[in-house]
Image: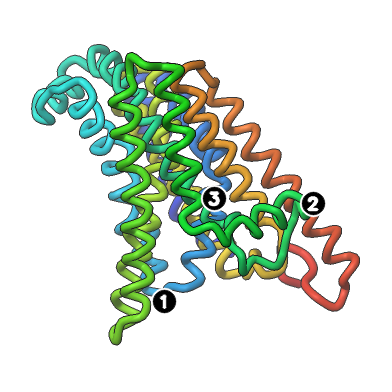
Amino acid sequence: MLKLFIGPILLTIVAFGASYYWGGAAMLGLVMFLAILEISLSFDNAVVNAKALMRMEAKWRRRFLTWGMFAAVFGARLVFPILFVSFAVALSPLKVIFLVFVNPAEYSHLVEAAAPVIHALGGSFLGMVALKYFFDEAKRVHWIHVVEKRLASWGRVQAIEVGVILSILLVCTWIVPEHGSQILGAGAIGVVLFILMEGMVDVLGASAARNVKQGFALFMYLNLIDAAFSFDGVIGAFTLTTQISAIVIGLGLGAYFVRTFTLVLVERKTLTSLVYLEHGAYWAIAALSLCMFTALFQHVPEAIAGTISLVFIGASYISSLHHNKRHKGHSHEITGS
């Protein structure tokens, strides 16, 4: 599986060399830190993506790593923030693009001004992802058994996850009334996007040309999830620097490693051998969603969100190993041995 990392490693060497050439040790250090930040925030993303990739043909998996990188780097980490800034501060996208390259410091201020829109949309979308998983009446395997079993039983209530997210949005508008319309509007968009993408995957998956159409639908769905995960990292990056090149390179490298790690999880069938790893990922997503909602009225350092994700992933990994020891006839280690 090490061959999968040859591309990311070679690209990293080139990117680090270019960063040092353009901006010296300061820019190199910044790019390295941003790449690590992106990776630490996205371990849960890798696990969730791996579950969807298991349903895709090999060619769509390769496209996720190749074509999808264009969407990950330039779409989720450059174009989407531009569109959100344009919507939040009522500027034309062309004007915002002009500021990106001519006056990045001003663009950084606009990103901060658009933070309520970005956090509300990202928090709502990721919240729907997590709640859809836990509010599943058919779910039989539980990690935090008492809590997850109760949540699964609540899945009988139709569209309960939508009600929970809308309730959280209403509470946030009460706490931060000056941004109420932005929070409700962006949050509603996040909910609708999730419903549309889930519906597209289900409908195309049941169609005659299943492999091609479902592969495309899952490809789009995974890139939309990646975009939602990237919002927190983008905002955090702008609190560190206004150098667009450093942000795109650093976050892009992190995204490339995360996507490669996702393929490793799929090819080694890790989600099958480590039964609770998926649960830990969804708990991490739920925590990240709450961090985004909390950020609407209280600053939440990116290090906290990253640490929470790693704690959930690490704890679920250890629990999975203990489970395998108790059931030696089943799966063993992450190596698949």
Residue 13 seen: no
| Amino acid type of the residue that numbered disc 2 sits on in the rendered structure | Ile
Rendered view: 3 above or below 180? below
How far from the left and from the top, in percent, is residue 25? 45, 19
CA gap between label 2 and label 1 equals 30 Å
Q: Earlier in the sequence, mark 2 or mark 1?
A: 1
How far from the left and from the top, in percent, is residue 316? 73, 51
Residue 55 seen: yes
| Residue at which label 1 appears | 57
Task: Tell me, yes or no, whether the two marked residues, 3 and 1, touch with CB atoms within 8 Å.
Answer: no
Rendered view: 201 above or below 193? below
Task: Tell me, yes or no, whether the two marked residues, 2 and 1, touch with CB atoms within 8 Å.
Answer: no
- Quarter occupied by residue 266: bottom right
SS state under label 2: helix
| Amino acid type of the residue that numbered disc 3 sits on in the rendered structure | Leu
Report the residue at 34% width, 46% height from top: 72
Q: Earlier in the sequence, mark 3 or mark 1?
A: 1
Instruction: Pick whichever, 283 or 333, lies toward us.
Output: 283
CA gap between label 3 and label 2 equals 23 Å
- Quarter occupied by residue 15: top left
Task: Quadrant for the N terminus, please.
Answer: bottom right
Instruction: Pick whichever, 263 or 288, lies toward us.
Output: 288
Residue 33 vs residue 65: left or right? Answer: right
Camera-near label (3 vs 1) is 3
Outermost residue on the front side: it is 157
Query: Which numbered dot is residue 106?
Result: none
| Residue at which label 3 appears | 131
Task: Quadrant for the C terminus, please.
Answer: bottom right
How far from the left and from the top, in percent, is residue 199? 35, 64
Report the residue at 37% width, 16% height from top: 177
Count of picture labels: 3
